[in-house]
Image (cartoon, helix red, strand yellow):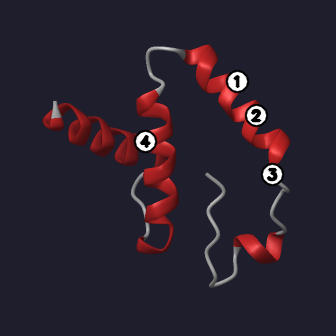
Amino acid sequence: MIHLVFSNLKAWILGTHHGVSQQHLHAYLNEFVFRFNRRFYPMTAFNSVLGIAARVEAPTYEALYSEEKTYYM
């Protein structure tokens, strides 16, 4: 099972993002875990994203590119 997880992660990073930077690695891993845990229930993932989006305040441009990291999940 662990080989499946890492092969999916590697394919996702190289295919979707064409590599990642150390600066954003934590955010990419959070997204991968979110998607992987909901892979059998696509509507659950959609409802989760809607619920999260309704509860959190959108980050500003400055917050996205500042040195201080805030993760919303």
Whether pointer 3 and pointer 4 mark residues with C-beta atoms closer than 8 Å, the reply is: no
Residue underneath mark 1: 47
Q: Do the residues labelled 2 and 1 touch (CB within 8 Å)?
A: yes
Q: Are marks 1 and 4 in contact (CB under 8 Å)?
A: no
Q: Nearer the viewer, mark 4 or mark 2?
A: 2
Q: Is residue 47 left or right of residue 42?
A: right
Q: Earlier in the sequence, mark 3 or mark 2?
A: 2
Which circle marks residue 51 in the picture? 2
Q: Distance between the residues labelled 3 and 1?
A: 15 Å
Q: Find numbered disc 1 in the image and state the secondary structure of the residue it sits on.
A: helix
From the top left corner, tell me how far across and down residue 55 is, in percent: 82, 45
Count of all numbered marks drawn on residues in the image: 4
- Of mark 1 and mark 4, the one earlier in the sequence is 4
Q: Name the residue under label 3.
A: 56
* CA gap, disc 2 and disc 1: 6 Å
Q: Viewer-nearest of labels 3 and 4?
A: 3
